[in-house]
Image (cartoon, coloured by chain):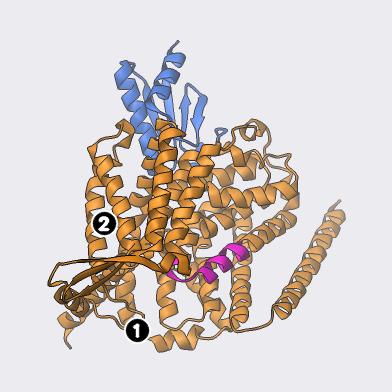
Chain colours: A orange, B blue
Amino acid sequence: MDVIGFVLKLLQGGLGNLAAYLAAHVLLCLVPAFFIAGAMTALIPKESVTRFLGRNAPKVVSYPAAALAGSVLSVCSCTIVPLFAGIYRKGAGLGPAITFLFFAPAANILALVYTGGLIGADLAFARLFLSLLFGIGIGMIMALIFRRSEQARDGNGDAMFAGKATLKKASLAFLLILVALLLSGTLKIGLLTNSYGKITLPISGLDRFQAFLSRVVPADAAKGQEGVSVQGAILIGLLILIAAAAWRGLGKISEGFNRWTWASLGLVVMTLLVAAAGMTAHPGGLDILFTGKMFGVVLSVVLLAFIARKRLTPDEVRDFLWESWRFIKQIFPLLVVGVFAVGIIRELIRPEWIEALAGRNTLLGNMAGVLFGVFMYFPTLVEVPIAKMFLSLGMHRGPLLAYLMADPELSLQSILMISAIIGKTKAWVYVFWVALFSTLAGLIYGAFKDGASVLRITLYLAAFLALLAAGLWRMSRRANEHQGGIR
Amino acid sequence: MKIIVLGPGCPRCHEVEKRTINALAELGIAAEVEKISDIQRIMEYDILGTPGLVIDGKVVCSGKIPRLEEIKAWILEAAG
């Protein structure tokens, strides 16, 4: 057996996948998303959301506020754990805390944008909507099941939730324009994708370069592998330059702006522009098409610069850049390693296996998706390229959603962490509900994708919820009788 | 003086620890700086988000990274 040839083939698979990934337009959504996450952390005061999570907040307010906190405040795991423990022990209680815990990894801005950009907007919306619904649902169920032990929590934390800070108007505008930047790069509407002009750079030999790239990173539609274009190669080059400049420019931003800061910001804008443009290489040179996206990028960047200069304090701008860079530094290497690994794994998995197991929207297929999510632990966001791989290998979108719902919620690590805070029993009951609801989410979404009518899905869902409510009601009655018997 | 940095070990918490040590050095004040990363012990303090900064038993800041000048002011205040 040719072992060396086999290993080389695996490595080529990994590197090819990585190159195709970095070169693809996924950058156009990921780069703004990192800056949005940074802006959220730096510019949104925690108190503007947490003050709705105090002990005395009514349920109608605290559950949605918990979900909001999940998607806005917790892009970083070092925020999730203390906030979860705080809401549980000293604030609104177990229900909202669980809602927060469930919603945070599935629906923070990075996860949603990334899912939308890499796999499809439909799946991102399904992830957002079903996580919201089930997050609140599971929170309420947990609160109901454990309402007796709820009363024993320690109190006197009201001061923690009394903050009055609100979001500044300028910060809000800044965030909205960042979102606009993101949308102008990712929305596929004619206004943005049409080109409004063309110049040709007379660089010869680029067509041979393209031929070389196609040979090194062959596209294989059957396995979902993408090739690398000249444009992609330029983007990879720019990324390496950004990494070099940002290390000094953004990493040391707390000591003030320096030359490297401006260099790295310039490079980031450059990258966005190159990614937004249309490029084709031919023997005569390189055609550059000015797309609507490019104008969107330019307009948003100018507006952002204006707000940062006139309306935000220098401290806020520094915090914003520091936090954004921190996200990039923390998450991007994980993604690079993850995508490389996915490229290798893809060489080893045969599409027939995936198709046989989860090619159709069956109960078994959805359960397989959830189980895989529980037993495999992937760092933040790496679940998305993995899901993309499954999709290209023939997984149905239903089981795929089941996997995407379960994986970030239920890893062994997170189960251990929450059981340290709420106790083993509650943690395992939570795990059970998440597994059940993830399977259900996959089934519903899969049925929807297979063309089942919305009415029928709603009927099934209503029947299931009625059954659930009846079960919980009986259980709580039995618990009451049991208690009565002891007295 | 005893200063405690609360944080499970994320980059933001390291940044606070670094800035605290810099602040002490610039002020020329000696203090014991402890880093607590056990979540159970962190939750004994009334904070909703890490990193948290505790000076002489009092939580002065939580959920954000304070500026160097702010830390200096708190230290001077605690030093009297």
The structure residue drawn at horizontal position 54% and vertical position 72%, both measured from the top left corner, is A401
User: Chain for mark 1?
Assistant: A
- The answer to which of A81 and A352 lies nearer the viewer is A352
Q: Is residue A420 visible?
A: no
Give the position of the N terminus of chain A as an image quadrant. Answer: bottom left
Residue highlighted by disc 2 = A239
- Crowd tier of the residue under label 1, counting other residues whose Cα lies within 10 Å: few below 14, some 14–19, many 20 or above: few
Q: Is residue B78 left or right of residue A217?
A: right
In-image side of A99 versus B27 (left or right): right
In the rendering, at what x and y percent does residue A326 appear?
36, 46
Residue reaching furthest to the left: A205
Give x and y (percent) for residue A123: 53, 70
Disc 2 residue crowd, few under 14, some 14–19, many 20+, Cα 10 Å: some
- Distance from label 2 to label 1 (Cα)? 26 Å
- Residue carrying label 1: A221
**Magenta span contains residue A101:** no
**Residue A339, image x, y percentages:** 33, 67
Q: Which residues are magenta?
A: A117-131
Q: Is residue A484 above or below residue A224?
A: above
